[in-house]
């Protein structure tokens, strides 16, 4: 099924959804450390994007499994481009002199507090997601060949264990080292990593359903034999 059509019905929609999740996760929720008190476990500290960012990895699994590593790589770079623009826009908006009135006098400090650290969040996200996402896609693609397309559950979970370990550790160290207390930083990294990995395992039935649907609808089931795994190209 590697004789692929030149165009796909759903590829662009998945790309748009991926970019939306990536932007919202990094700009809305990533800077907030939240706490919940859970039965038995006790107080748990985690990043507020915890419930949303793992969706981007689910998209990555789906893209690699159906369309191949090369097309997943293009989607990742599209997300990075959106992050770069959002960081530039945030910098310009924060630096522009505010109008001289009571509302803006109160609003400007809040704007700086929310978006003033955007460059570190974006830098952390870009470096961490580049390493983590490509590691995730690489492991899944290689496991697909090794298993001859069987055991999708093992490929999804196995690639997530590797990709999320790289992504979570790098992101929080780059974005919040020196800002959050070290013990809180370590607690958030551990919580984020465990939850993201468990989330992907729990979401596997939905992932498998979407993968099966897309393979039928698109008429493609890509195997990355002979693929150039260089992350610094957008060629398919």
Image (tube, helix red, strand yellow):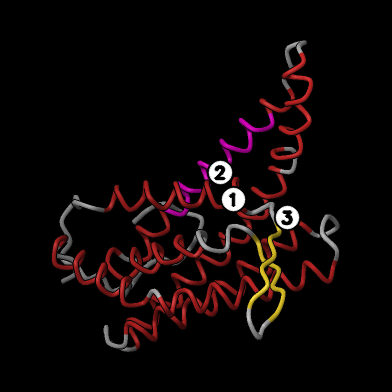
Q: Which residues are magenta?
A: 75-91
Q: Earlier in the sequence, mark 2 or mark 1?
A: 1
Which type of secondary structure does the marked residue at label 3 adopt? helix
Q: Residue 174, relative to residue 93: is it above or below?
A: below
Q: Position of residue 64 (x, y in %)?
A: 35, 67
Q: Residue 103, relative to residue 205: is it above or below?
A: above
Q: CA distance from mark 2 to mark 3?
A: 14 Å
Q: Residue 22, relative to residue 141: is it above or below?
A: above
- Outermost residue toward the front in this view: 39
Which residue is label 3 attached to? 175
Which type of secondary structure does the marked residue at label 2 adopt? helix
Q: Is residue 59 magenta?
A: no
Which type of secondary structure does the marked residue at label 1 adopt? helix
Q: How busy is the neighbourhood of tag 2: few (under 14 within 10 Å), some, or many (20 plus)?
A: many
Q: Is residue 76 magenta?
A: yes
Which residue is label 1 attached to? 26
Q: How busy is the neighbourhood of tag 3: few (under 14 within 10 Å), some, or many (20 plus)?
A: many
Q: Earlier in the sequence, mark 2 or mark 3?
A: 2
Residue 162 falls in image quadrant? bottom right
Quadrant into which the N terminus falls: bottom left
Nearest to the observer: residue 60 or residue 24: 24
């Amino acid at each position: 099924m590697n004789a692929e059509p030149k165009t796909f019905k759903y590829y662009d929609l998945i790309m748009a959804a991926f970019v939306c999740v990536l932007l919202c996760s990094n700009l809305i929720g990533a800077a907030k450390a939240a706490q919940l008190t859970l039965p038995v476990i006790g107080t748990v500290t985690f990043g507020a994007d915890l419930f949303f960012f793992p969706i981007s990895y689910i998209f990555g699994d789906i893209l690699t499994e159906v369309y191949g590593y090369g097309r997943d790589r293009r989607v990742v770079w599209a997300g990075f481009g959106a992050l770069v623009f959002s960081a530039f826009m945030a910098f310009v908006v924060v630096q522009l002199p505010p109008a001289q009135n009571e509302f803006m006098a109160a609003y400007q400090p809040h704007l700086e507090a929310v978006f003033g650290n955007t460059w570190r969040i974006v830098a952390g996200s870009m470096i961490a997601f580049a390493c983590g996402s490509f590691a995730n896609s690489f492991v899944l693609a290689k496991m697909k060949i090794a298993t001859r397309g069987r055991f999708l559950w093992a490929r999804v979970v196995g690639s997530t264990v590797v990709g999320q370990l790289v992504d979570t550790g790098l992101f929080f160290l780059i974005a919040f080292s020196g800002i959050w207390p070290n013990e809180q930083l370590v607690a958030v990294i551990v919580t984020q990593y465990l939850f993201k990995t468990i989330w992907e395992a729990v979401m596997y039935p939905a992932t498998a359903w979407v993968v099966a649907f897309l393979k039928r609808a698109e008429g493609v089931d890509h195997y990355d034999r002979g693929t150039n795994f260089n992350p610094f190209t957008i060629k398919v």
